Image (cartoon, rainbow, N blue to C red):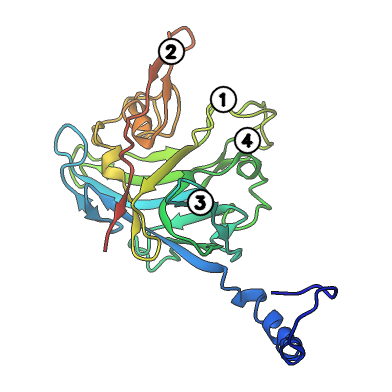
Amino acid sequence: MIFSSTRSLPFPRANALLISVLPALLVGCGGDDDPGERAATVRFAAQINGEAFTCGKTYSGVGVGQPGSYQVNDWRFYVHDVALVKADGNRQPLDLDQDGTWQYQNVALLDLRQDCGSGTLPSNNVVKGAVPSANYTGICFKVGVPYALNHLNDATAPSPLNASGMLWNWRGGRKFIRLDGFGAPGSDNSTAFVVHLGSTECPGADPSAPPVAACGYPNIAEFCLDNFNVDQDRVVMDMGHALAGSNVAFNTANTASGCMSGNADPECIPILPRLNLDFTYVAGASATPEHYSKVTPQVLFSVGKP
């Protein structure tokens, strides 16, 4: 406590003692040692239908149809606006460490590949930052990149917004989720089947320039999880749940492999609603739009307990 100069104390010696120790107390109340702030590390884990993700592994029972086997060889995604949630529901944004590699401003890249058959790759499964010390019981975050950062020039964007393989073009922006794989791998029916989530209908004539207005479908989804202890728990992302309604060994002719967020791609119909997004499917210029509501409650993320 700091007293004003006009307030008198009844004990002169105590007053002198206070004056002698006050500078030391003030030094201990600021800077990185401030007990009012704490570091927080949010750990992410990847699964396919409850099985831990290993790059290049083939999983069985994925989606619908036969044989239901699926091999995954790339898994990366962006998150932003990460916040811990107090018991009263108030959110505290995580002040991200600006590490120059995986985190920039309020955006972080999770790269879960590790080893995809070409040697060890740089990987990251955490979001690191700081929050005021408090009792937190939940977490909220958005999957994707906010508009202001999504359409930075990919040639000059800071890391991780310049990540190789996570770019479409300047106008389209970044792939918010990149999951690459093959349905029925090693068989005559082997089919490339990917999930690339990103913004669509970003207006502009030049793909090598930023959009001239906001994208028609931003495709940014928010997720909130209760009963989450940031010091012990993990945020589990299960793409097997996102593929639960898909035949991963089939792709409609003359369309992108799997789902790349296109509104004319029928493979996106069962996938985007499972990514906590409403989806509008338009088969052609004269076709009537079909609207598919997001699956509730969301199925993509859950809390993993130790």
Which tag, 2 or 1, sits closer to the chain's start? Answer: 1
Are there few (<14), some (14-19), or many (20+) residues within 10 Å of tag 1? Answer: few
The residues tagged by marks 2 and 3 sit, at their Cα atoms, a distance apart of 34 Å
Q: Amino acid at mark 1?
A: Gly
Which tag, 4 or 1, sits closer to the chain's start? Answer: 4
Q: Secondary structure at mark 2?
A: loop
* Residue 114, label in figure: none
The residues tagged by marks 2 and 4 sit, at their Cα atoms, a distance apart of 24 Å
Q: Does the image show residue 229?
A: yes
Which tag, 4 or 3, sits closer to the chain's start? Answer: 3
Q: Disc 4 marks which residue?
A: 171
Q: Disc 1 marks which residue?
A: 216
The residues tagged by marks 2 and 1 sit, at their Cα atoms, a distance apart of 14 Å
x 56%, y 56%: residue: 160
Outermost residue to the front: 10
Q: Disc 2 marks which residue?
A: 289
Q: Amino acid at mark 4?
A: Arg
Q: 239 or 211, which lies in front?
A: 239
